[in-house]
Image: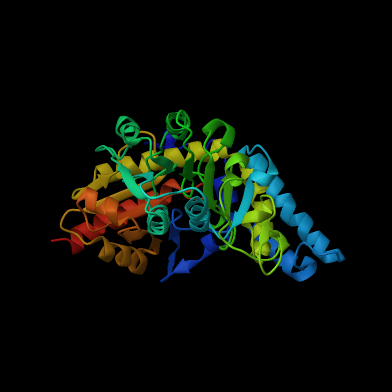
Amino acid sequence: MGTEAQKTHGLDIDRIRAEFPMLQQYVHGKPLVYLDSAASTHKPKRVLEAMHRFYATQYAKPDEEHYFSKKSTELKEEARKKLASFMGAGSETEIIFTKGCTEGINIVANGMAQALLQEGDEIILTQLEHHANIVPWLMAGQLTGAVIRVAPINAAGEVDLDALESLIGDRTRMISVPHSSHVLGSILPIREIAALAHRRGIPVLADGAQAAPHMPVNMQELDCDFYVFSGHKMGTPSGVGVLYGRSEWLGRIAPLIGGGDMSEEVSFSSCSYADAPKKFEGGTQSFADIIAMGPLIDYLNELDMHRTSKYEQDLLHYATEKFAALDRVVLHGTSKDKEPVLSFAIAGGDVKKLEKYLDAEWGIAIRAGDLTARPLMQHLGVKGLARASFTFYNTYAEIDTLTEAVETFIREKVK
């Protein structure tokens, strides 16, 4: 890809990078090259400033009657309203605040186990799953006797829809899949999967941890019944995530956490639950982090996720071309429809050693190892992969640096 093709789609990348203080840091005397956004992203100034302003001049626990509590409640519910619009939810009451993506999946899995699953029922997953979309369903199975069935992927890392459809049977009670793979980047056709499921009245959960930061998501268009993502992968502090749930299904599943405001009537012999969203928001949440969602959504809307998505795709294509030309590099995940994730192995090389080398010698942050996806690694026949992941504040120059660094590692460290 030449200079002419290095488009930014109207984004001022230098200005964007100036909004992220962490990107100005140095590592071992080298400028930080942060290519680990699939793990977590850095925070823009406006989010950091909003957090400081809240703690310094607006702080109070929400849902009480004094002035600053009312202000806190207003900011929290404003964030919920913005998220409902951002996601195309049918109602603000379909937006549940969680600790993160993992808790969102656990809420649904436990809620199904407590209220709906029985022995012999089946949950369909895929070979692409993060452990966070496996373990909660195993736990649900331990409680109920439900079992997991697994849809296979092809050589490009794409889910075989015909094979997935063949798994759907009379005992299928849930299909829970990633919107995009955190390892291979593959984007799943959620709307098509939902159509297959809904013909039989089966709900679909989409794990949007890797998709929501990189593309516009609209619940009406995807037509899934649950959708989860984490704020820290998009630019908020850690400690906040979102569970979207279709109202019908939020009414059918049980809550995970019992406590104060999630209940209506309480005695020593019984209790009744509040309606969603309170039903699923038991206990004191990390409300400052929730409030930070508001300015983040404003920022993402200003950037325009259609533009950032196109730019990130160009970065991915550029990196893919660069790495495809490197000796000994084996790329994994070759779907044409994927998120900005580049995973690779090095023939004869150790990806964990590469990870440490890139940090120590070049100031480059990537992730390497099993990537919390051991069943997928077993399927791919590797112990681990190196993963570089990109977002809208990354640059073509950073990809050039990564390419040079990996090439040097192979030349000097791999026998």
Quarter of the image with the N terminus in it: top left
Question: 363 left or right of 295?
Answer: left
Residue 264 appears in which quarter of the rendering?
bottom right
* Picture residue at 62% right of the left edge, 51% below the top: 96
- Residue lying at the far front of the rendered structure: 269
Q: Residue at x 57, y 63 (%)?
A: 239
* Nearer to us in this view, 179 or 365: 179
Q: Is residue 259 left or right of residue 385?
A: right
Q: Position of residue 143 (x, y in %)?
A: 42, 59
The residue depicted at 51 percent of the width and 55 percent of the height is 114
Q: Position of residue 325 (x, y in %)?
A: 24, 43
> Which quadrant: the C terminus?
bottom left
> Viewer-proximal residue, 324 or 168?
168
Quarter-of-image position of residue 197: top left
Left or right side of 350 for 248: right
Is the residue 247 above or below the residue 40 in the image?
above
Please count the marks in the image.
Answer: 0
Q: Residue 286, how many percent across, how many down?
A: 64, 65
Residue 158 in view, yes or no: yes
Q: Position of residue 86 (x, y in %)?
A: 63, 41
| Residue at 52% over, 37% down | 224
Front residue (pair 283, 220): 283
